[in-house]
Image (spheres, rainbow, N blue to C red):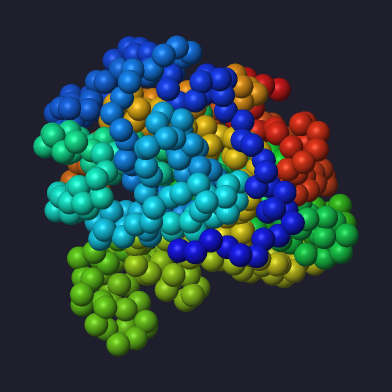
Amino acid sequence: MSATNSVSPLQRARSDYQPKLPLVFAQQGAAVRCVEGDCLDPLADAEAIHKLFPHTAGLPILTFEPGEGAAGKALHAGVILSGGQAPGGHNVIAGLFDGLKSLNPANRLVGFLGGPSGLVDGKQLEITAELLVHYRNTGGFDIIGSGRTKLEKEAQFDQGLEHCRKLGLNALVVVGGDDSNTNACVLAEYYRKIDAGVDVIGCPKTIDGDLKNQFIDASFGFDTATKVYAELVGNVQRDANSAKKYYHFIKLMGRSASHIALEVALQTHPNATLIGEEVAARKLTLSQVVDQLVDIVVRRAEQGRHFGVFLVPEGIVEFMPDMQQLIKELNDVLHEHEPYLKNLPTQDDRRQFLFNKLSAEAGKSFSVLPQAIQIQLMLDRDPHGNVQVSRIDTEKLLADIVEDRLREKKAQGKYHGKFSAQCHFFGYEGRCAAPSNFDADYCYSLGFTAAALLGAGKTGYIASVRHLDRPAADWSAGGVPLTTMMNLERRHGADKPVIRKALVDLNGRPFAELAARREEWAVRDCYLYPGPIQYFGPSEVCDPPTRTLQLEKGGK
Ligand code: FBP
């Protein structure tokens, strides 16, 4: 991959930005004292996880403190970017590189190309200081690319090891979400079991914000992505409030969890925000969700307001009990009849075949959906078995059904307004944005932490930088055993050890803030316009973390 020749003025100015580090690293580089704390059991299914991971379960939590680090072996590390892009990935690599060099200038870093498949296929690139100059503080994963190949089979691990040996590597850093860090954990255990001499460390990445727990404050990329979406939603709100003629249905990325929609709502105060986890808890069907939106349109019309903005998390359909049942049955039929379905000549044949295999109830839910949505629900699952929710036009589905209901109401004399919908999907727009100061600092610190963990000879850990609501100098850095975050989940008919996804906590403060204010936001126009991310200027404009993080950490 070649370095970019043409750069924008912002990119040029940004390349001079020196990301902030936790004090311990700022003062000493990555050669710091590694302090072992309590041994941590898996948060759930401890006995089973211990059995599956005899070498990496029950390890102690680690913290880096000022003081001399143990003199370690020379490190030759490989880094893999895995899964969807998230702002700050390049800074993880920069932090890792600088951290390794601070341990020993002879240490090396190579990047595996195109995600985990780069390790298996032996495709890599030497990371050098000259190359990194072009990527520091930039968005994207283009320095080495990313991919969604699932690393799960021993044959893949063995092939990867062969390439590591050829390249003289003794360490790997996997930058990814819950699924990729699950794979990193399995890889670490396997390499330790066979005494491969390759240590494996994970880093928490995903714009979705669903890789967090008591040890991980946030995944990187969530801060920047939500700021980009909040800017766009704010702009749309201003347009809606100026023209006063459209309802905007905005689908936001984030996979199953609704963290992104919730955070964007807290930053912008739209008229309605659907939260998948609430829909599931209240067992709301598609029709009931539509009723809620219709009610808001009707009440606003009574005040002469015929415009508004609704936020829709992309994974919402998976939380509606009727749709959940439908998706579950579709998954089973798609899995069981995959080759046959692939050979059917038309989409219509496939639709008909699937429909005939569904239970009466699921068939009913399927048949009320517009054809385009039926086809989208039939699309291939991703390599981890997930429905590709970013490819389902849920915002259009909701807008269509809301319009139908309003038409009925009008005919019954229960609604006298005007309704015209505009649909948007904000997702890819935010994944490669230039990282905010928060993500630039956090990612660089994560990379540095990964280097320090390798320097301390650790394997099977995820880099953990905590107290992220404080200034960077006060952040603490350390490592948490990947197995601690594991539990058993049913996947493809078998119990599999996986890192638990964090969904929106309905008892948590971010959701409580939305719940307390949404009635006012629904009927009045309380729009907030956050504007674009600021990289230069006063700290209160450039540096604040997300509302979610502030509230979760007890802030006002
Ligand atoms: P990760 O879990 O890999 O971080 O994915 C993030 C994400 O952006 C999701 O929000 C979205 O549903 C998905 O990737 C889209 O996947 P793709 O890039 O394959 O279209």
Q: Is residue 175 left or right of residue 186?
A: right
Pick the front one: 395 or 487: 487
Q: At which x and y percent is residue 315?
A: 49, 53
Report the residue at 26% width, 20% height from top. Answer: 59
Rendered location of residue 465, percent (x, y): 49, 27
The C terminus lies in quadrant:
top right
- Residue 181 visible to the viewer: no
Query: What residue occupies the far front of the structure in this picture?
Result: 106
Foreground of the two, 360 or 40: 40
User: Residue 56 location in percent, x, y?
Assistant: 22, 28
The structure residue drawn at horizontal position 28% and vertical position 54%, both measured from the top left corner, is: 119
The residue at the point 26 percent across, 78 percent down is: 342
Relative placement, left or right, of 358 versus 97 is left
Q: Is residue 221 left or right of residue 236?
A: left
Q: Is residue 437 above or below residue 240?
A: above
Q: Is 461 displayed left or right of 421 in the figure?
A: left
Q: Picture quarter containing residue 341?
A: bottom left
Residue 429 x/y as whole percent: 61, 59
Between 444 and 425, the one lying in front of the other is 444
Q: Compared with residue 168, is residue 454 higher up or lower down, i.e. above or below? A: above
The total of numbered circles placed on residues is 0
Q: Residue at x 23, y 25 (%)?
A: 57
The quadrant of the picture occupied by the N terminus is bottom left
- The residue furthest left is 194
Q: Is residue 110 visible?
A: yes
In the rendered view, tell whether residue 154 sits above or below residue 502.
below
